[in-house]
Amino acid sequence: MAVNGTAIAILLISFLILVMLRFQIAYAVAIASIICLLYQGLPLTTVCQQMVKGISSFSLMAVPFFITMGCIMGSGGISEKLIALANSCVGWMTGGMAMVNIVASYFFGGISGSAAADTASLGSILIPMMVEQGYDDDFSTAVTITSSCEGLLVPPSHNMVIYAMSAGGISVGSLFLAGYVPGALLALSLMVGSYIISKKRRYPKGEKFSIKTFLKQFSVSIWALAAIIIVVVGVVGGVFTATESAAIAVIYSLFVSVVIYKGLTLKGIWKVLEQCIDTLSIVLILISTSSIFGYCLTTLHVPDIAANAIIGLTQNPILIALLLNLILLVLGCIMDMAPIILIATPILLPIAQSIGINPIQFGIMIVLNCGIGLLTPPVGAVLFIGSAVGKVKMEKVVKATLPFYLCMIVVLLLLTFIPEISMFLPNIFSK
């Protein structure tokens, strides 16, 4: 295996320099790849070929559809209904509104699949509501941004579709199933952390639990929650592919938002579609440029070199697993989620498999690692959104989030070393 060390150095160093110069990740990836290709004397037609190849995938079409569904449902008046449902479930507990925030994020995440959308939609309602009821503004914001990461794990998550594509055609249905228990475990850990803090600070309880109120709110929210059933049951049951299910979900979300909830008008639909186009353009540009970067990494044998380097440090599976998580957490501090998945998966997945980590389990690990990265400076997009929505200084939010970082790390370690947490549902339905 011939290794061109100079070309590898040019690719990686130029990429890091561009990132430090605050170039957009998509442009940094593309420019670094072009410089590397020029050094190797390869034709620049390779750039166009790899960009087209990167987005010419039927499975990838599910990503625009899922993003569109999330935008429509998020703007269709569903947030208030899911908050009311969550309040009827857990509002009676100590720190009730924090619990409501966490459970509502679990519900909403299953519809939007986006931590940023969750923070913007639910945060704009729940943070002022929590502050009004006596909760500290930094605590309210910290709960909102950390619980938003549940939506990355709970299907349908478009990031899981991106991972499935990057990992070489892993079953999207199995990934969807694998996210439910980890998402619930993350919610439970955040609720425990919130309860301890709420007890210490004497935050208020909500109204007593009422089965009548719960059934009433559930009957209202069932139309929105049914979108998840359509997607997951349809894909897992083999009724249709992930792409087909996503397209059906878009039509269903339009029907629910316009006809059932009446939260969207025809004029409002066009505004939502404009937001979708903004998001989609960023995602698709990232995927296409990352395809060039991935081509350079593969032709230069970087995945093999990285695997040999890590295994050369230690052959202890526990230490290798911890090192993989550490690499992903560090990357999360300087890069956004999609490019990490696109770039790191081809490099790190073979290493994970070599120590017995299932590709589906590793997908859940990488998504949660990236989710934690969304909450960490200097490039934590969800951290910035939460700070803006809550009108709290970022430094104050980071300090308030420290206990919740610990909760998330504990869940990450459990997912790493107890594969049954991720594989429980996929194993049941694969039989």
Image (spheres, grey):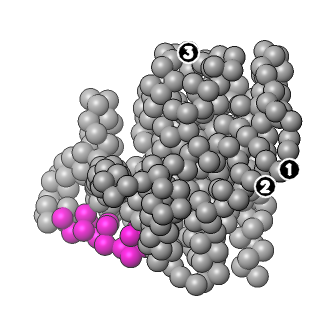
Callout 2 secondary element = helix
Residue occupying the point 70% across, 25% down? 403
The question of residue 379 being in magenta is answered with no
Q: Nearer the viewer, residue 402 or 385?
A: 385
Q: What percent of the width, then of the height, locates residue 389?
A: 47, 27
Q: What percent of the width, then of the height, locates residue 339?
A: 40, 49
Residue under numbered circle 2? 215
CA distance for labels 1 and 2: 6 Å
Give the class, few, some or many, for how many residues have Cα within 10 Å of label 2's Cα (few <14, many ≥20).
some
Q: In the image, which disc is placed on residue 239?
A: none
Residue under numbered circle 1? 211
Give the class, few, some or many, for how many residues have Cα within 10 Å of label 3's Cα (few <14, many ≥20).
some
Q: Nearer the viewer, residue 115 or 104?
A: 104
Residue under numbered circle 3? 396
Q: Nearer the viewer, residue 371 or 15?
A: 371
Residue kind at label 1, given as amino acid type: Ile
